[in-house]
Image (spheres, grey):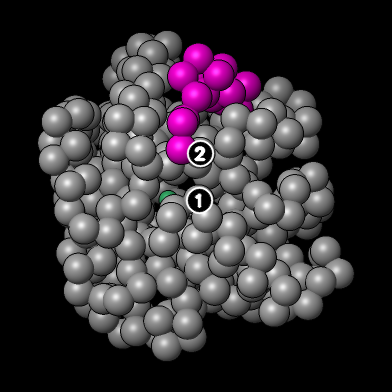
Amino acid sequence: MIDTHAHVNFNAFKDDFDDVIKRGLAQNTQIINVGSQLSTSKRAIDFAKQYANCFASIGLHPIHLQDMLVEEEGEKFTTRKEDFSYEAYKELAKQPKVIAIGETGLDYWHLNNNEPAAVAIARQKQVFAEHIKLANELNLPVIVHCRGLPTHGFGKASAYDEILEELTKQPPENGGIMHCFGGLIDLVEKFVDLGLYISFNGILTFDKTGHIADILRATPDDKILTETDCPYLTPEPHRGKRNEPAFVEFVIKKIAEIKGMTFDKVDELTTNNAKRLFAI
Ligand SMILES: [Zn+2]
């Protein structure tokens, strides 16, 4: 199994990261810890050095481009504005087991009121473009985050259309991941054509609308990946608890159920897909 998007490098795990990582690894789950700013990118690299079968992705998440109070599934935290330093991340990427750039992308959900949204969004696009440039320079895939405006339903998922436009302007030469994709079904093919994989997490297990299951059905088998996005988005049957890499098995179970495949087949498929993308 492989958790292609974990944040054991976040503060939610500061007291027990060792137990959490070991629980995941004990289940034969490879773990990619994804950085959201310089400090968490460095911690992801520390874990990659410390544990076998742990890897790191480094990048600056769009919510770290402004100071803001973020509320996520009942948890509140304040982000500190950070400027993207191409050279600093390029230097970090020289460390062993850095296998991707991100997470990066567009987040129209979390925007503060200190400046016009258009200014914040222009900055997000520019920083996103720099991440793709870095990934292309270093021959790495890119991990993409995209979240739309709260007022936009599935019919007007503008953040997804706009990220598609950015990716078309400067395609990631080594592929990448649309992580936690929730846009329109028609867009799946367009992202796949640009070399992106689609990764699925706990939302698949508790989404009552069936939209994420439809996205799964629209995704070619060789483009499906699994992730947890822990500590968030805990899958059933553990809703209410903090998420962790060991829970990726529940995502695999759900994919197997929806696609009418065995657990082992989905495990093999998603693990091989991740190995191909990340060259691990
Ligand atoms: Zn994430």
In the visual, does 63 lie left or right of 259? left
Give whichever of discs 1 and 2 has the lower sequence position: 2
Q: How many marks?
A: 2
Residue drawn where x is 59% and y is 58% of the image:
273
Tell me if residue 127 can be seen.
Answer: no
Tell me if residue 49 can be seen.
Answer: yes
At label 2, counting other C-alpha atoms closer than 10 Å, the crowd grade (few under 14, some 14-19, many 20 or more) is many
Place of residue 26 in the rendered image (x, y in percent of width and height, measured from the top left): 42, 88
Q: Which mark is residue 277?
A: 1
Locate residue 12: give its quadrant. Answer: bottom left
Q: Is residue 93 above or below residue 112?
A: below
Q: Which residue is mark 2?
A: 175
Residue drawn where x is 25% and y is 66% of the image:
48
Quarter of the figure with the C terminus: bottom left
Q: Nearer the viewer, residue 75 or 269?
A: 269
**Does the closest atom of ligand 1 sit within 8 Å of the Cβ of label 2?**
no
Q: Which mark is residue 102?
A: none
Quarter of the figure with the N terminus: bottom right
Locate residue 239: give its quadrant. Answer: bottom right
Place of residue 241 in the rendered image (x, y in percent of width and height, measured from the top left): 49, 75
Q: Is residue 269 above or below residue 168?
A: below
